[in-house]
Amino acid sequence: MSESDARGPDGRWRAVAIASAAVVVVLLLLGGRTAHRAKTAPEFCTASCHVDTAAKHYTAVGHTALSCQSCHPISAGTGIRLAIGSKHQPHGKIAAATCSSCHNETEAKWERIALTEGHRKHPGGAKLDCLSCHLETSHGKLATAAETCTKCHTDVRLHKKSHTPVPPSADPGKLEEHKAQCTSCHNFSLPGSKSSKGLVTEACGVCHSAGVVPTGDVVQATVIRRNGLHGGVDCKLCHQPHEKASGPKRACKTCHQIQIVASNPKLPKEHIACESCHVQHQPIESAGSRCVTCHEQAKPKATGAKSTALRHDQCASCHLPHTWAAAPNECVTCHSRQATLVQTQSPPQHQRCTNCHEVHGRPPSGAICGTCHKENARKLLAGPVKHQDCTSCHNPHAPQVKVPTTCAECHKQPLHQMVTLGPPSHAKAGCQGCHTVHGNPKADTKTCSTCHKDKITLVAKATKVEHQNCQSCHAPHRFSIEAPSAPCAKCHTEIAASTAPAAPHTGKCGNCHASHGNQTVTREKCLGCHDKIGFKPPPGNAEHTRCASCHKPHTKATFAAERCGKCHVDKASVAASWPANSAHRDKCNKCHKPHDVRDKEACGTCHATHQASIAASGKHTCKSCHAAHEAPPADKKGWWKKCVGCHATQVKDVTASKKHNKCESCHQPHKFSKPDCKSCHATQAATGLHVKKGHADCSKCHQTHLGSIPGKTECLSACHVDKTNHNADAKLCTGCHVFKL
């Protein structure tokens, strides 16, 4: 019997039961393992069915550490069925509760995300679950926010075709991310993150900032100043974010309940349209500067001069914004001080501002006064440039001039001199006493004649034009002359320089010169001091009657002699021909007495020896040979040629003589006494009959200027008359009577 038979029926069944139990255990173990794998292992999904998931989808940010089953739950039975090949078994459906298992408000981070504007609107307000928006992107699919949002919202993106420049480094596969998306403005991000923004101006500034959007396309939010029009205000208050047309679409009156005053039927349509004056995002004050775009009178002129309007900061300074009405009496609003002056200190014609001010014309100058004050304006043309402007002296709003207070504003120093240094009468008369109010204010001699008639009569007789003008000597506003010579020195500089202590007349100029009138000093004036000079001018000589003919008043008297040559040119020329060491070359007063030229000094003053010799001769004087103003001969021998003037016969005889043919051979200058022949003929005088007493005098026998030897005739006629018959036949006495051995 076999072993199986031996077991019997019970044994077989027991074996089957054990085997079956083992199989069940194995199956249970395998099923449990499979079920666990199906619920937790991503490979369970991607290895058999979802093999292309990794290729089709990117791992979602934040979900990289999660398995598929973390979001797609699978039951154990479903997992086993899927494992044994039931591929069409529904499984892995995501529920909103699945998301909230991780993204719940118990964590601070998710609580803050839930409070963002986007999450408050969608899960909160619209009661949408997470999968309504995040289902498409749960695996990191590159679905844009616009693709997600447009499932529910119509595509109303303002920048559907974004103008935003794409960075060069951008991933070509992610270019869509750089375009404007719904989330570019609507915030779903964690507060504080880089992508977090509020649905206000901050969100707009992400794109509308310098360097992101081309300036020519839109206004950059970064250049909108807070003091600009609507600066710091939420952009969407004016701009409709989902409108494709640019510019504000909300009417201004939505916020600004400003009623345009239409009482003026001439109000142009440009004044009703807000954008005519107000520019988006520009400072509110700039609206006033835009008036020039339409109003020509508010533009700067070609000359560069600003109009009256442009001298105010804004047109709105006078024109009330939104009504643009302006009235002349409104000037007082800003110009209250001027208005008070006009009302209290101006004539009725000045009461209205527009009488002088052209509203949109050039600012008025003093020339405007000539419109009414024609005569005074004409006179002012003769005055200095500054005085030609009426406003130089007249306050336009209080034109009454207060003299001298008004004058002192420019002429403070002259006024001070007049009050402190000038005559009291001038201070009492004031500026107008001498100066013309309208016209040329410069005072002249004619002005002075009003009070000083006697002096003006004298001044008119002055020899020089400068002395006929009072201001030449009298300093304006001082007038009094404390030091009389001081004014003279201003013009007569060379005289002032010559009044050194050694110079004459160093006293006051008025001692000699008349203060008013002819300043020429007369002889009588000079003789008033110089009364002991013995003045005796030669009769008929007018020049010698005037002191100034010889004397220069402000130089030493000794210089007078140097001036003789100016009149006596011929005599001065002769004097100059004398040798340098000669007294005759010296000044004329060496011979002529200064104040009586006819009374001349004796020649002996200089030539004492010569004059004594002449005096001894008894016949000759200095003038016998020397003329008073005669040029000297080339040498001293030339003086002997003058002998012929008186001694013509003798000179003729001498010239004919063989030996004694020159005067100077026997005569000595300045003595002219009979010569001593022995000076030359000493031998003859001691020889022969020359020693006889009667023959000692040479001139008894010899003719002086002939130089001939005496014959018989001379002997018998001169001394020996009684010897006429002695040897009457003898021709010569000297034949027997020997004189020369």
Image (cartoon, rainbow, N blue to C red):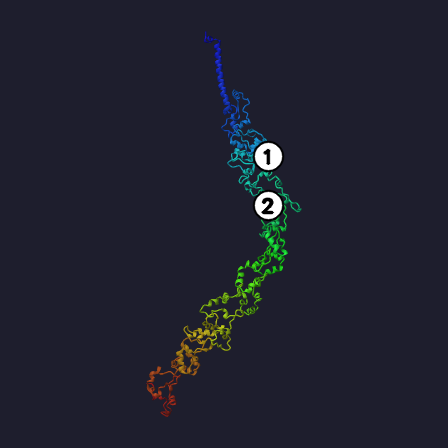
Is 311 positioned to the left or the right of 504 in the image? right
User: Which disc, if any, is residue 287?
Assistant: 2
Q: Is residue 162 above or below residue 694?
A: above
Residue 728, visible in the rendered structure:
no
Q: Which residue is mark 1?
A: 156
Residue 155 % position (x, y): 59, 33
Q: How many numbered tags mark residues here?
A: 2
Q: Amino acid at mark 2?
A: Ala
Q: Earlier in the sequence, mark 1 or mark 2?
A: 1
Q: Is residue 86 above or below residue 11?
A: below
In this view of the protein, which residue sits in the foreground, 585 or 37?
37
**Distance between the alpha carbons at the discs numbered 1 and 2:** 34 Å
Q: Label 2: few (<14), some or many (≥20) within 10 Å?
A: many
**At numbered mark 1, what does the secondary structure look like: helix, strand or loop?**
loop
In this view of the protein, which residue sits in the foreground, 690 or 457?
457
In this view of the protein, which residue sits in the foreground, 643 or 614?
614
Quarter of the C terminus within the rendering: bottom left
In this view of the protein, which residue sits in the foreground, 331 or 5?
331
Residue 648 % position (x, y): 43, 82
Q: Label 1: few (<14), some or many (≥20) within 10 Å?
A: some
Residue 630 % position (x, y): 44, 76
Residue 408, visible in the rendered structure:
yes
Quarter of the N terminus within the rendering: top left
Residue 154 % position (x, y): 60, 33
Q: Is residue 631 above or below residue 351?
A: below
Q: Amino acid at mark 1?
A: Val
- Looking at this rendering, what residue extends furthest in the top direction? 1
Disc 1 or disc 2, which is closer to the eye? 2
**At numbered mark 2, what does the secondary structure look like: helix, strand or loop?**
helix
